Amino acid sequence: MHSSTRSLRSPLGTELVLSVPTTPQPSDTTWVLLHGSDGHETDLLPLADRLAPDAQKIAIRGTERTAEGYAHFRRRPDRSLDEDDLRERTPLLIDAVDHGQAALAPTARRIVLGFSNGAIAAAALLELRPDRFTAGVLIRPQPPFRSGPVGRGSASPVLVLDARYDERRAPGDGLLTAERLRAVGAVVDLVTLPVHHGISELDEDEIRHWASGLPETTTGAGGSTAT
């Protein structure tokens, strides 16, 4: 299935790409895509097109410049997360999501999918702004914050994909992320795959299987029923 794409800049200056399927009856879902470190906004579009060819996509460029691309937040020299920076950039992501969605047809579901750095940012969004999303897919996340979970969000379904041989994550990072989201009300499926850090065919199969079990429409956060 073919899609048309166009680039936009949000009011707060974040670059994003919109992808709209050319089918006469697109699905009632928008996927929000957050790339990994040293990435670019279009990195996850091929994956999302395979997973949901008839869905709209909002692909967001990170606002932190890196050596080979972009990231959605800054790490300290010791590779620990700069949590203050992540919190400060959350409104930039929400601004980009809202701006992108306003340029697309309204949909009942909005799913955020993040990989690596983008998965951490997506976990922060699901914790801090659950009103903007109906579901989430986190590929190789780690907990976005050391403090206790903030507030209580919606009962959104979330898929966390951990990797048994991940050289860039500590053992248990996926579980800790899942527990944080469960503490704020999310319904989390945690799957540990026999893979390394990168996205694999097994990840794709798991996401496709998980997404097939989502309801067709929802009255939860993020879509046309909540804007």
Image: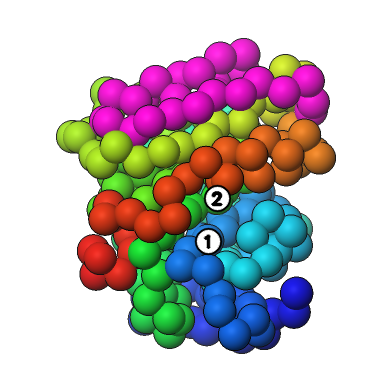
x and y, in percent, of residue 118 in the image: 56, 48
Q: Secondary structure at mark 2?
A: strand
Q: The disc labelled 2 sits on which kind of residue?
A: Leu
Residue sticking out furthest to the top: 171
From this viewpoint, is residue 208 visible?
yes
Please tell me which residue is depicted at 40% across the width and 70% down the height of the picture: 107
- Label 1 or label 2, whichever comes before in sequence order: 1
Q: How many marks?
A: 2
Picture quadrant where residue 180 is located: top left
The answer to whether residue 186 is magenta is yes
The image quadrant where one finds the C terminus is: bottom left
Which residue is tagged 2? Answer: 113
Query: 165 and 210: which one is in front?
Result: 210
Which residue is tagged 1? Answer: 31
Please tell me which residue is depicted at 48% across the width and 53% down the height of the picture: 112
x and y, in percent, of residue 182 in the image: 34, 25
The answer to whether residue 127 is magenta is no
The magenta stretch is 170-196
In the picture provided, is 176 more to the left or to the right than 88?
right
Please tell me which residue is depicted at 64% across the width and 60% down the height of the picture: 52
Label 1–label 2 contact, CB within 8 A: yes
The image quadrant where one finds the N terminus is: bottom right
State whether residue 89 is above or below residue 194: below
